[in-house]
Amino acid sequence: MIAENKNHADFHGGSAQRLLARFEEKSVFVALDTTDPLVTADNLKAALSKFPDEPSARVIVDITTFTRESLLILLALLRRRFKKAKVVLAYVNAAEYSVTNRMKQSG
C-alpha cells in the first residue's frame, strides 16, 4: 500500500506516483485525508481488504510520514484484519517534519 494525504498532495513532490510506478501491480494506492478521519479509515480498510489474511503474513509499515491520527487508524485496522501477522514498524528520520510550516512559508 502506498498512502498519501490527498489534501496535501501538492507538497509531496510526486513521491506517491514514483512509488506506484516503481512497484506497479504490487502496490495499492490509498488516499488519506487529514481533515476527515472517516475517509482515511474507510480508504485504509478498503485497501487492506485486498490482501489475504495469512497466518504467516508479515507486514512492514514505514511510519515516517504518517500523522498520528492516520497511524493509529492503520494500526487498529491491521490488528483487526491480520490477527496473526507479524507487524514491523519502520522509521527513518525525515528531512522535513511539517507540511504546515512549508505551507506558511510559501503562502
Image (spheres, helix red, strand yellow):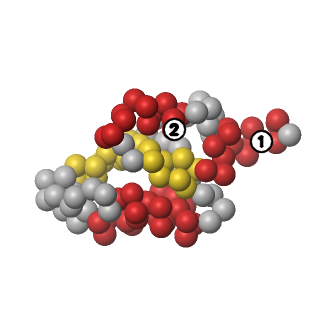
Query: Which element carries disc 2, helix, strand or loop?
Result: helix
Q: How packed is label 2: few (under 14 Cα within 10 Å), some, or many (20 or more)?
A: some
Residue at x-position 47% and y-position 61%: 43
Q: Quadrant of the C terminus?
A: top right
Q: Which residue is mark 1?
A: 103
Residue at x-position 43% and y-position 31%: 21
Q: Position of residue 87 (x, y in %)?
A: 28, 52
Q: What residue type is disc 1 on?
A: Met
Q: Is 81 on the left or on the right of 54, as rendered?
A: right
Of residues 60 and 36, which is closer to you in this image? 36
- The picture quadrant where one finds residue 55 is bottom left
Q: How packed is label 1: few (under 14 Cα within 10 Å), some, or many (20 or more)?
A: few
Question: Are the residues at dot 1 and dot 2 in contact (C-beta closer than 8 Å)?
Answer: no
Looking at the image, is 86 positioned above or below residue 83? above
Query: Which element carries disc 1, helix, strand or loop?
Result: helix
Label 1 vs 2, first from the N-terminus: 2
Q: What residue type is disc 2 on?
A: Ala
Question: Residue reaching furthest front?
Answer: 25
Q: Position of residue 75 (x, y in %)?
A: 39, 61
Residue at x-position 31% and y-position 40%: 26
Looking at the image, is 2 positioned above or below residue 76? above
Q: Position of residue 18 (x, y in %)?
A: 49, 30
Looking at the image, is 36 positioned above or below residue 71? below
Determine the CA span between mark 1 and mark 2. 19 Å
Q: Which residue is mark 2?
A: 16
Q: Is 60 on the left or on the right of 106, as rendered?
A: left
- The picture quadrant where one finds residue 33 is bottom right
Residue at x-position 66% and y-position 51%: 7
- The picture quadrant where one finds residue 24 is top left
